[in-house]
Image (spheres, rainbow, N blue to C red):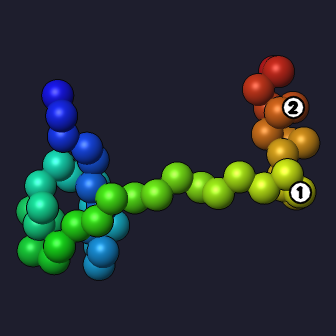
């Protein structure tokens, strides 16, 4: 299980292949969202986890 998920540049499809099976474009590793201590929606995200 050494493969990582990849995302197509043009259509946004997720796959494990180097090229997109849908459109044939190359795929890249998607990066996680950046952490920001001044997150404007952090309060609402924490509240939704409690409910």
Please state if 19 lies on the left or on the right of 38 as rendered: left
Quick check: 7 above or below 50? below
Secondary element type, mark 1? loop
Residue 35 position within the rendered picture, expressed as x and y whole percent measured from the top left: 71, 52
**For the residues bearing labels 1 and 2, Cβ distance under 8 angstroms:** no
Q: Residue at x 79, y 39 (%)?
A: 45
> Mark 1 or mark 2, which has the lower sequence index?
1
Quick check: 49 above or below 10? above
Tag count = 2
The answer to which of 12 and 26 lies nearer the viewer is 26
Residue 22 position within the rendered picture, expressed as x and y whole percent measured from the top left: 13, 66
Circle 1 crowding by C-alpha within 10 Å: few under 14, some 14–19, many from 20: few
Which quadrant of the view contains residue 19?
bottom left
Which quadrant of the view contains residue 50?
top right
Residue 3 position within the rendered picture, expressed as x and y whole percent measured from the top left: 18, 40
Please state if 9 lies on the left or on the right of 17 as rendered: right
What separation in Å lies between label 1 and label 2 (alpha carbons)? 16 Å
Which quadrant of the view contains residue 1?
top left
Whether residue 50 appears in this view of the structure is yes
Quarter containing the C terminus = top right
As drawn, the label of residue 49 is: none
For this orientation, the residue located farthest to the top is 51
As drawn, the label of residue 38 is: 1
Whether residue 22 appears in this view of the structure is no
Which of pointers 1 and 2 indicates the residue nearer the eye? 1
Q: Residue at x 18, y 34 (%)?
A: 2
Q: Which residue is mark 2?
A: 47
Q: Residue at x 27, y 47 (%)?
A: 5
Please state if 3 lies on the left or on the right of 44 as rendered: left
The answer to which of 31 and 44 lies nearer the viewer is 31
Secondary element type, mark 2? helix
Circle 2 crowding by C-alpha within 10 Å: few under 14, some 14–19, many from 20: few
């Amino acid at each position: 299980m050494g493969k990582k998920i990849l995302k197509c540049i043009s259509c946004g499809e997720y796959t494990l292949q180097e090229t997109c099976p849908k459109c044939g474009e190359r795929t890249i590793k998607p990066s996680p969202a950046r952490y920001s201590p001044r997150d404007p929606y952090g309060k609402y995200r924490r509240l939704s986890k409690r409910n």
